[in-house]
Image: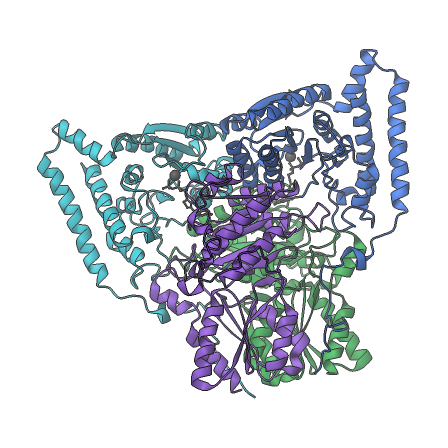
Chain colours: A blue, B green, C purple, D cyan
């Protein structure tokens, strides 16, 4: 139920982002991409004092970060480049880095996040903390050398990390989907597999992987097969069929989520653009700098 | 060969003016027709036709052995291009955005740039792709990459500002026996005012030669890429409003730098302003300043100044990006200061 | 903690003079003792003690959680260092030779340098390692890497020339909240004349501050690293043989550049020579020239000149490397020319 | 017999290089490293008109290039930085690139050669040539992202390439040796395995891999287990035991090889150092350039 609510919120924010910033939005992979990120985030130990697990993603919906506890206004501020955004409008970011709630911002650099998350997991290991770093990626990223170096590092150092590989959206130059698990095993990782259609199953399997990683089994790869239908719709149908939920309740969830996101957008929309003088302070000067106050006069 | 040519390579054949982007597409097309060793590789350049559609229709026309989609692995396919170049092929690599050349930095600077020097053979290859800001693309889709490579002996860097030059320089780059990095400013790709009618016959613009984009007497402005047009705007304004005459030098090739052309102009005007969209510290202006000091100091009647972007990653928000990028106003102000110096 | 300290970190405790290399080892050791968040990673730095033995004995003393050997994957372990820095650790990465920083170019310039700017948090980490020519190491074991990063806002670059500075600057770099690239010239590591007695107490040398290595009145020479010593040699010779007085400015930190220090000196001498071991085109001299043009042009009584290496990969054969690297004689000749200008 | 002669020549050159340039020599991995490179090179179609297979190596003995037909004097000229070296003393190179005889020079960049050799193999494929590119590497190189990107590219493009992985010298951070074959299979490569002790077996297995690649089976990985003893000594013992060879003949081979290399060294030793004016012509100028002839005078 909570899962449905979170998928619904993520979908509502996703739809809003698509409408408002469209192509220029932080990369997102269409409606199906809220799973597996949302159930994966749910499988983590979440905290708001910097003591929980850490989540990031390279593909999929940034709105999945809501599950980690980020305020939807913060995601919108980033996307709209508002003064109040954590990056002050300097970077769209998808969602911001906020390590108190275990969030590391995505970047448009395939592979790099694998290395960085491996380093975060390394810090858990070095400090003896019982925490896990989880990254959602897809097969396209696996072509990059950084992906390989990051995973190889994680493997050699046996760090508590989980890589969730989403097969929802394949590119023509992607390696065959079935190679992911083979590769995982070839690196000596734990490997897990689940159909992406059922978000509850995804959550369960990711949870197993997370707890394996936490208990010292090293890097775990979860292979999420492309869903055969929209996982959110699937879950709704399933809950309805099981009489676990009424049509009204479903509509209620959706409306509440839409209303929340609309309100967030209204608020953020009214917020001011960043002030260059503030947002770019300390980042040098533009133009000829003739007018800029020099520490000493420009002529003898 | 193709029965029906893709639209973006037809214009010159039909005696119609072309955009900057079409000029590039024509250069690729004609070089591929001319030389069977030329082939293209890059992300989504085949069926999809490239992020900016430069190569739309090329796969259908030239087939999968001449137009190769690649995995997202810029180091890997740039290295593979080097291997193909060792065997006498002439690969033209597209970076989807030039920002993504970074993963290929190692193979470009250490392997490709040094091959001829190491006695391992010339590597005729071109790396081309879109650069530059102004599109609200944020830090990873807006970079200028010249200064990442300007310091590397063995590489050439080209950065055209007009459709004519883009076509002629790209052809020259493809025919060159050494590796060339070719930067295409996104703000020029479809700019209507850059449409021009190009010669029907084959032509090249030689690498390593600057051009005088505007003659003038008071201040030399050395610039390149999109900033050529910003500077020409400033020049027109200064002429009209202040009677100040700017000479605008469009470098076209950044490496090797056409030192003689710059020095000759500065010796006439006695003043030098360098304008680049790229960030300030460690930008190209520095090298120009050194060359002019070495060869034209006595002719200088004022300090060498520069107009550049700020020292930051390219910001995402529109107001910030506008505050970050150099403007016509900046050029006007600096040139006026120098003219009156 | 260790019962017996490794030999290379004992000298200052024993009130003995230390080499440049020992100064670096002491800085690492003391920072690791001071702050449990500091840890080291790199190729063969553990059991093997590092290619230059800087960290010999560190693994035994601090254990495998503070001294981490890595696979040969500079991008991967630099990225991992960034991750650890996100969590408040302070990684110090050793590049076995700084030439091998190239595979980490992407993660350094795009991820690490932009983190604070993107609002993703400061990344306190240091990348250190040996640079420079003169060892017959050929193109891949002799590079200076400053210009690969000098153009990247968000990074700092340090390049010390003395044992005192090496220790104090490395400590400052480790304590700095932003990423620092720290270059150590191999020619300084064990140079006997660089041995000096260091303070017994903890000290840092602040980043971003140049120092005057020699006071003088006729020509300002801005330089760094090994070339500080070549320049001091030239200065001594010029003083003795020609009565020419050089002021030698040792930059120490290249980025941010201590513009005020340079400008102040040039305003006194009216002449500027920049000396760097690194290759010529696109070298650091350019930025110095621009800054001085912007702020001290009126004081200049001669052209800004530079003494640099050639524009080539570092050659392997001894005679070629000697012909490639800037020499004392080059500095003498250029400074004499300027003094008489 | 021919194999023994070639191993002996390679060993003789190797010993000479170790003595003359030592640590500063192009990287070499000690005596055992002449195998598997020598038998691997023998498995190729060798030609001297640029029509044969192409060989390179990242680890192992550069002297293995003798098998491809390089003159030992050329290897020595490179190592000693002579004017007459193909690089004119600018680069030590191990052995020089000479594509007429199918040689691509090694560089000290783990992984890069994998990408470059993949591109060479790609050119064979694009031009429909029946040729193969073969690279000898070891497990340490497999940590680098370039290694992964090069192999992934080769796999996706199904190019005729063979990677021979030498396990003779393991580093502490190397992935487990047994992972190489698993990884090869996970990328979809053909995989082959052989004990490095017997160079004849290595040659046979590599030959199979090369012909598979040539016949369109795509990238092939040959996993060469660390030899239990010096393969050259092993071969000698084996030939003696089989009465295929006399002690005298063995001594004869060795002496002939040593004499050839000594003569080569004597000749190269007497050759001049490079002239900087020639070797560095076109590579800019050093120093202040005040004295350099400027196209126009330096004062008005
Ligand atoms: C270094 C680098 N190269 C290329 C790109 C451009 N790029 C981003 S995603 C992508 C296509 C693959 O997308 P994928 O990760 O599979 O996401 P999906 O389309 O499946 O949502 C490309 C070419 C980039 N951002 N960075
Ligand atoms: C990019 C890069 N990083 C590091 C090195 C230094 N390096 C070369 S070989 C090597 C150790 C691994 O050697 P290996 O390839 O296993 O050869 P072996 O010692 O087995 O002969 C290291 C660290 C390098 N040359 N290039
Ligand atoms: Mg995909
Ligand atoms: Mg090894």
Q: Residue furthest front?
A: C14
Left or right of residue A258, residue C204 in this image: left
The structure residue drawn at horizontal position 24% and vertical position 55%, both measured from the top left corner, is D73
Q: Is residue D24 above or below residue D175?
A: below
Q: Residue at x 13, y 30 (%)?
A: D240
Q: Position of residue A7 (x, y in %)?
A: 79, 27
* Residue C283 falls in image quadrant: bottom right
Front residue of this view, candidates B221 and C223: C223
Determine whether, in the image, residue C192 is placed left or right of residue C287: left
- In the rendered image, the vertical position of residue C217 relative to residue A217, given as above or below: below
Rendering quarter of residue C253 = bottom right
Q: Nearer the viewer, residue A198 or A272?
A: A272
Q: Position of residue C160 (x, y in %)?
A: 53, 61
Q: x%, y% of residue D74?
A: 27, 55
Please tell me which residue lies in front, C36 or D188: C36
Residue D292 in view, yes or no: no
**Residue B115, quarter of the rendered image:** bottom left
């Amino acid at each position: 139920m909570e899962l449905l609510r979170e998928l619904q919120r993520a979908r509502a924010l996703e739809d809003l982002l698509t409408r408002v910033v469209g192509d220029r939005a932080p990369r997102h992979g269409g409606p199906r991409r809220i799973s597996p990120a949302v159930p994966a985030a749910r499988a983590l130990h979440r905290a708001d004092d910097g003591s929980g697990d850490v989540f990031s993603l390279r593909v999929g919906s940034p709105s999945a970060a809501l599950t980690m506890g980020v305020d939807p206004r913060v995601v919108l501020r980033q996307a709209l480049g508002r003064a109040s955004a954590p990056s002050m409008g300097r970077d769209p970011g998808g969602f911001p880095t906020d390590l108190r709630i275990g969030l590391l911002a995505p970047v448009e650099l395939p592979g790099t996040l694998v290395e960085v998350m491996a380093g975060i997991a390394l810090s858990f290991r070095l400090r003896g903390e019982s925490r896990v770093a989880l990254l959602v990626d897809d097969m396209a990223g696996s072509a990059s050398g950084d992906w390989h170096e990051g995973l190889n590092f994680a493997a050699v150092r046996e760090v508590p990390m989980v890589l969730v590989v989403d097969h929802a959206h394949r590119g023509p130059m992607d390696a065959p989907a079935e190679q992911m698990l083979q590769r995982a095993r070839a690196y000596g990782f734990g490997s897990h597999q689940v159909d992406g259609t059922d978000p509850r199953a995804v959550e369960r399997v990711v949870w197993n992987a997370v707890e394996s990683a936490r208990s010292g089994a090293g890097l775990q790869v979860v292979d999420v097969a492309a869903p055969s239908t929209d996982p959110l719709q699937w879950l709704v149908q399933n809950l309805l069929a099981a009489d676990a939920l009424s049509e009204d309740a479903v509509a209620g969830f959706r409306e509440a989520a839409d209303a929340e996101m609309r309100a967030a957008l209204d608020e953020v929309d009214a917020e001011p653009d960043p002030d260059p003088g503030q947002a770019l302070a300390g980042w040098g000067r533009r133009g000829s700098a003739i007018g800029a106050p020099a520490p000493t006069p420009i002529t003898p | 060969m193709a029965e029906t040519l893709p639209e973006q390579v037809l214009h010159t054949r039909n005696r119609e003016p072309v955009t900057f982007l079409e000029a590039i597409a024509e250069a690729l097309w004609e070089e591929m027709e001319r030389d069977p060793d030329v082939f293209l590789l890059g992300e989504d350049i085949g069926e999809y036709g490239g992020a900016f559609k430069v190569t739309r229709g090329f796969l259908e026309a030239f087939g999968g052995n001449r137009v190769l989609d690649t995995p997202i692995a810029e180091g890997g396919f740039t290295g593979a291009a080097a291997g193909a170049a060792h065997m006498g092929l002439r690969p033209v690599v597209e970076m989807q955005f030039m920002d993504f050349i970074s993963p290929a930095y190692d193979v470009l600077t250490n392997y490709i740039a040094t091959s001829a020097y190491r006695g391992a053979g010339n590597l005729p290859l071109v790396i081309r792709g879109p650069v530059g800001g102004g599109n609200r693309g944020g830090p990873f889709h807006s970079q200028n990459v010249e200064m990442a490579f300007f310091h590397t002996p063995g590489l050439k860097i080209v950065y055209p500002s007009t459709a004519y030059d883009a076509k002629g320089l790209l052809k020259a780059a493809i025919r060159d026996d050494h590796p060339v990095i070719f930067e295409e400013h996104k703000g020029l790709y479809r700019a209507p005012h850059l449409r021009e009618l190009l010669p029907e016959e084959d032509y090249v613009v030689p690498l390593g030669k600057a051009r005088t984009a505007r003659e003038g007497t008071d201040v030399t402005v050395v610039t390149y890429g999109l900033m050529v047009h910003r500077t020409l705007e400033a020049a027109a304004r200064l002429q009209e409003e202040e009677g100040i005459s700017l000479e605008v030098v469009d470098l076209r090739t950044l490496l090797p730098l056409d030192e003689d052309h710059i020095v000759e102009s500065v010796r006439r005007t006695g003043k030098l302003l360098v304008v680049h969209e790229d960030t300030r510290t460690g930008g190209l202006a520095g090298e120009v300043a050194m060359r002019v000091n070495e060869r034209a100091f006595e002719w200088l009647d004022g300090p060498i100044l520069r107009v550049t972007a700020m020292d930051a990653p390219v910001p995402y928000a529109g107001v910030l990006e506008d505050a970050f990028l150099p403007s016509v106003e900046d050029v006007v102000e600096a040139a006026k200061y120098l003219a009156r110096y």
